[in-house]
Image: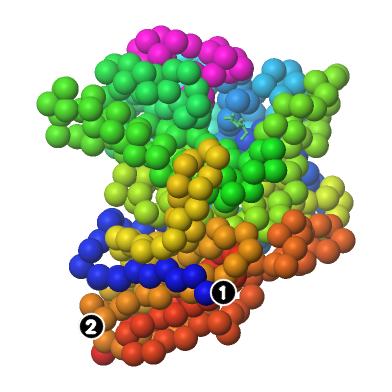
Amino acid sequence: MRLASCVLDPASVVAPVHRRTFGSFVEHMGRCVYTGLYEPGHPLADEDGFRTDVLALTRELGVTMVRYPGGNFVSGYRWEDGVGPRERRPRRRDLAWHSIETNEVGIDEFARWAGKAEVEIMYAVNLGTRGVQEALDVHEYVNHPEGTTLSELRRANGAAKPYGITMWCLGNELDGPWQTGHKTAQEYGLLAAATARALRSAEPGLELVACGSSSSSMPTFGSWETTLLEHAYDVVDYVSCHAYYEELDGDLGSFLASAADMDHFVDSVVATADAVGARRRSKKKINISFDEWNVWYLSRFQGGEPATGWPVAPRVIEDEYNVADAVVVGNLLISLLRHSDRVTAACQAQLVNVIAPIRTEPGGPAWRQTIFHPFAKTAALARGSVLRTRLDAPTYATARYGEVSLVDAVATHDAEDGDVVVFAVNRDQNDPVELTVDLHLFDGDPRLAEAWTLSDDDIRATNTLDDPDRVVPHTTSQVSVDGATLRIVLPPVSWSAIRLEVTR
Ligand code: AHR
């Protein structure tokens, strides 16, 4: 059997595990909101019309923060359409997804849902068709305590206390020609900086995210970040990254190595931001909010029929995920954790129905897609600090990313309770790999607490309405701890999580 190994050192810490790494994204798109999280009349809807099955699955997923309300949608959105009496709310065209927005759900409803789901809200303002004034207005509505027109409007609409939203996205993907109100880097940099300054004078403690490139393959990648940060470095805290991966042309080897691309993407944006900081002789560091990431079969969407008519909550990009997709998602989380020194917030896109871990049927059940499982286990198990995890492992050649490691892994250590958790993937399509983890640098004896593996003889197997639990993680018996050494056999195309208790 092929072998991989690493030595873990509790003193070799990357950064704390940031709870915001386990963020998600709710966009007014397709059926994410309507018949996703909100469906009055559903047998399981609560008094506010929220599906309690989706709320329960959101909590089980371990989501900590949710970006809202878009996405491409936000670049044409008027937030005030979504507040006040429902019967007076306008129906509007959503140009991003060519559908009708009924505005039945707006910020007040979403904040109520977020309270029930126990998640922080990350709010995106419209810098596509709008600007500084509208950003200030929505901030006044949601965060100003009382005594002004818009804070009193919120109170009259039933929310006596402000929502206290800390993280704000300054628009969405404005480098993309598809974006309503698409801008040059210069135009966006000036607008983002002006909006940031205004929001900061309203509330100094806000954490502000400027839009980086909508993918690392954009022609302006790198120069966009440079120009933007030359204008906004001192007034923003984060630059965003967005990345979606898919298996293209049957090239499973490259697809399974998607995290290598994410690693490179993060390293490139960090280097670009630090170069701007160095030129400015700034001590400040700009962090990364990886606020859209996932597997998305984008090529199928682009190859599809153009939208016709103006439907309400149509089925859009409801990708059905298989075992290989789940392994890639688990691996992308490994990459995000590995970069916890600079990636301090991330959102899997999206939460429900639209390229999502949770699927629903209108009037019917909700279920967990395959990608739900590595996310839920990682969010539950990753605690304390991320440890530097340098692997000695065989490599393989990929068409898209060159030579990459067959095994990828990261470990976390909770110094409080002594737990060490190893997350690992095997990208080999045919053979298992034995991973050995040396824990002799820890002060105490490791004991195996739990070990989960997600793999299947059929890597194309999916979870469906009729068979919702076809793919779930299994406890594995192919694991042992001998003295200070952990050994686990990683099946081909698999994701695993192993928790060890280290006691003196
Ligand atoms: O998540 C789907 C879309 O992907 C978002 O609306 C947009 O920001 C990105 O291009």
> Residue 15: image x %, image y %?
28, 56
Q: State the residue position of label 2.
A: 443
Q: Is residue 422 toward the left or the right of residue 301 in the image? A: left
Name which residue type carries label 2: Asp
- Does residue 452 show up magenta in the picture? no
Residue at 35 percent across and 34 percent down: it is 268
Residue 358 appears anywhere in the view: no
> Of residues 362 and 225, which is closer to you in this image?
225
Q: In terms of image quarters, where does ligand 1 lie? A: top right
Is 116 on the left or on the right of 420, as rendered?
A: right
Residue 321, position in %: x, y? 71, 51
Q: Which mark is residue 299?
A: none
Crowd rating for badge 2 (residues with CA inside 10 Å; few <14, some 14–19, many 20+)? few
Looking at the picture, does residue 193 appear above or below residue 417? Answer: above
Q: Is disc 2 placed on a helix, strand or loop? A: loop
Specify the amino acid type for callout 1: Trp
Label 1: which secondary element: strand
Q: Is residue 22 left or right of residue 7?
A: right
- Residue 230 appears anywhere in the view: yes
Residue 62: % across, % down: 54, 60
Residue 174 forms part of the magenta stretch: yes
* Residue ID at (44%, 10%): 184
- The magenta stretch spans which residues? 169-192
- Vertical relation: 261 (above or below) 504: above
Quadrant of the snapshot with the C terminus: bottom left
User: Dot 1 corresponds to which residue?
Assistant: 452
**Image quadrant in which you'd find residue 92:** top right
